[in-house]
Every structure is written in C-alpha cells, then in structure tokens.
Amino acid sequence: MSALVFTGSGQVIAIGMWASPIPVIPIVETTMLVGLRHILMGLTLQPWYSQLPVPAAYGSYFLLTDESWGLTTVDFQRRPADGAFLGGRRARLVRLLGHLDRAREAGRSGYPRSVRVGS
C-alpha cells in the first residue's frame, strides 16, 4: 500500500474502513478530504516556490509532506528559496525503492506463502 499511497493518514483511513466488499469510493473520498490540508500548506509555500523553476515547484507541491513543509517554511524564512527542501522527493524515492526491493526478495524466497499469523 505504501508504494501506491504516499500518506500515512490515508493508509490508516483505508485500513480502518477496510471491509468486505472493499468500500473503494468512501475510502478515496475520506482520504482526499484529509489530504486537503496539503492545499493550505502549499498556499503558504507559494511565495517561495514562485521563485523556483516551474518543474521544481510543481514537483515539490506534488511530493509535499507535513515534515518537509515544516522544514521548508523554517528554511525559507532564514534564506532565499534555493530548493533545498523540495518536498519529500528523496524520501518518496527511497521508500518506493525499498518496497520494490522487498517485493523482489519476497518473490524469490516465497516469503508471502511461508509466513503464518497465529498458531
């Protein structure tokens, strides 16, 4: 799930609403509602991101996390916008590569078939 949904709160929501059959539309709607806070965070960064090249600014908005927003606002108040904390780009890439690596290893070892939960 982490490879598809880059939001911890979205994952918690999805697991909390999980049922049979899976209520896809309510899960997506609720996750989007919780994610609306990123619009407000993005608006606060607009004065600084407007000084960056358009691809860098849009990429930063797309990969914005709560943590990177906090670090970026503090950093941009101290010095001009230089793109030092451009969202969670590196964090998301490392996270995705880690999931892909674990999936590859699991496929080789038969991990999903060999693990049992409970007795």
Image: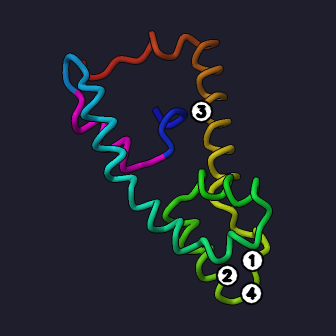
Tell whether label 2 touches label 1 (CB within 8 Å): yes
CA gap between label 3 and label 4 equals 35 Å
Residue 23 at x, y = what percent?
Answer: 24, 25
| Location of residue 29 (image quadrant) | top left
Q: Which residue is mark 1?
A: 81
Query: Mark 4, residues whose alpha carbon is within 10 Å: few (<14), some, or many (≥20)?
Result: few
As drawn, is 95 to the left or to the right of 2?
right
Q: Mark number for residue 99?
A: 3
Residue 55 at x, y = what percent?
Answer: 76, 53
Tell whether label 1 touches label 3 (CB within 8 Å): no
Tell whether label 2 touches label 4 (CB within 8 Å): yes
Q: Residue at x 69, y 63 (%)?
A: 86
Q: Tell me the quadrant of the picture where the C terminus can be found.
A: top left
Q: Does 47 appear above or below 15?
A: below
Q: Does 115 appear above or below 57?
A: above
Q: Which residue is mark 4?
A: 79
- Front-most of 10 and 43? 43
Which residue type carries mark 2?
Answer: Phe
Which residue type carries mark 3?
Answer: His
Tell whether label 4 touches label 1 (CB within 8 Å): no
Which span of residues is magenta-colored?
A: 7-18
Query: Mark 3, residues whose alpha carbon is within 10 Å: few (<14), some, or many (≥20)?
Result: some
Where disc 1 sits, the SS reads loop
Where disc 4 sits, the SS reads loop
Residue 92 at x, y = what percent?
Answer: 62, 47
Query: Mark 1, residues whose alpha carbon is within 10 Å: few (<14), some, or many (≥20)?
Result: some
For the residues carrying marks 3 and 4, which lies nearer the camera in this image? 4
Q: Which residue is mark 2?
A: 76
CA gap between label 1 and label 2 equals 6 Å
